[in-house]
Image (cartoon, rainbow, N blue to C red):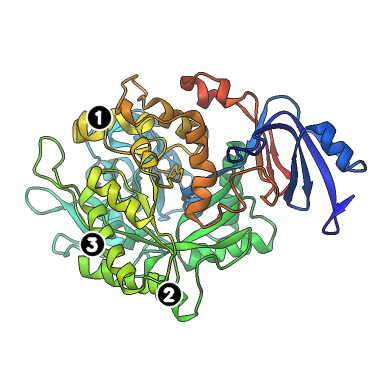
Amino acid sequence: MAVNDMPVRLLRCERIRTMAPTGAPQVVDALAVAGDRVVAAGPLAGLRERFPEAPETDLGGGCALPGFVDAHLHLTMAARDSVGADVSADVTPSADRLAERLRAAAATLPAGAWLRAGRYDHVRTTGGRVVDRHDLDRWVPDRPVLVTHVGAHWGVVNSAALAAAGLTDDSPDPRGGSLGRDGAGRLTGVLYEQALFDLAYPSLARRPPVIPPPGEDELLAGLDAASARFLSAGITSIGDAMVGPDELRLLQTARARDRLRQRVTALVTYPHADHLIAAGIQDGFGDDWLRLGGIKAFVDGAVAGLTCWLSEPFRGTDDHGMPVVTPEELTDLAVRVHSAGLRLAVHANGDRAIALLLDAVEHARGRRPDITTRHRIEHCSVVDEAIVARIAALDLIPVPFAGYVTFHGDALVDAYGEERLGRMFAHRRMLDAGITVAGSSDYPCGPYEPLFGVKSCVTRRTRAGRVLGAHQRISTGEALALFGTGAAAAAGEEGHKGRLAPGYLADLVVLAADPFEVPPDELDQIPVTQTWVGGVPAWTS
């Protein structure tokens, strides 16, 4: 039997959790799929009777769920980073190991070529001390070096890199960023926000980036490798959270060559918004594989990088962090994007930054109340009751870090304090206020595995075993929904992603065990055995 001229296939599994709303079948053992869509879900016997000629595929034991949707993950950045060295704390747990890894990576490069390294964690690798240009000069003296922090909002370069970028002790700070200096005013090699973006991030740079870009074949290979990792974690859709022309070209090339393995919604960086507006492109432009997800902008810096903008300073300091935009610039952008029918996806971590963004959105909504596009707050980390109430009133979709309590929590206590951390990543408080909340890893800033984020949201337990904000815990079902209909809604796709129900995409993940029956502390240990995209197997263990 066929549906809409497409043959029907049956997929059976020991248990399928459709994540359908209350009142619809939520646990079944079979799906009927036509093309890339689910046409029915229910008991296998009933679907066999309804579709007697449909071939069957056995997904085996375990539990099938809708494929995970990560609303904010840096896919094309991961592709670019794969060309460089990984210096995350897991592989460089000390300064000596960091030096060894940088030297080894440099030895593989042609003479004079840039060495890029990413995911440096100054807390876990160098005990809270930030390496500087002099460290990098000793370790790799013969080429320019950039080491980017795991939060991706600051990095460190050596003297050769400063020279290549034309930066001297007399160079002024760029608007929206700063150059690290010692007590005598000399450059330390640390580059904050726009200073880093200008050097290394083409989608945000205000000048041609200094670091030569990798070649297309290298980037496609990096995209293949990153996509395979994400598929192995059950991720079937990604909101790529920093896309400029170069990144969009890479995604389009991958799509044309059948090498785009996840569905991607592109968050295009704000310097390119006017080009989209002039072309008349509106929210959702594209198809089920590659589409526009919104306009990405920034109000402040990073939580882990300690550059977010706070009403109360970081503990033990008078440092409130930093905004990277003026109120006038932010309001102007909000009005232009909202009035064009495009979706705002604005990075705001600190409570002062979030409040400024809410002011801008309220102003834009006041100018054009007839436009009902639901805008996003990327990260939305530090909130209070007044902020939550304003988010609910504006029907915004926050996209908080799912895994940060477990991954970064121990390192954040000294800077934020336990009370403030109890108000951060406020999934429980926002859900209780009726707010749609999306799931996000923000990889490479945190682990990409959705089940790691689910465990963090359910337990609020750090790696050292400390519970931070027990009152913000949510249930396993609520945490899985963050990476289902919550993340889908952030891109306006909740009508066809995040459930295994008629009319929804046949994107699914098969787990070795049912997460609803696994102890919360073990959620991230459940093996992923299969990932399917559009009714087709995309990855198997």
Quadrant location of the C terminus in the rendered image? top right
Residue that sits furthest to the left in the current view: 184
Residue under numbered circle 1: 127
Q: Residue at x 67, y 44 (%)?
A: 501
Between marks 3 and 1 in the image, the one whose residue lies nearer the viewer: 3
Q: Earlier in the sequence, mark 3 or mark 1?
A: 1
Q: Residue at x 35, y 48 (%)?
A: 152
Residue that sits furthest to the bottom in the current view: 278
For the residues bearing labels 2 and 3, Cβ distance under 8 angstroms: no
Residue under numbered circle 2: 340
Q: What secondary structure is marked by label 3? A: loop
Q: Is residue 438 above or below residue 518?
A: below
In the visual, does 482 lie left or right of 422?
A: right
> Which amino acid does the dot numbered 1 rest on?
Gly
Position in image of residue 454 (x %, y %): 47, 32
Nearer the observer, 375 or 468: 375
Q: Is residue 27 above or below residue 5?
A: above
> Which amino acid does the dot numbered 3 rest on?
Gly
In the visual, does 385 lie left or right of 142?
A: left
Residue under numbered circle 3: 176
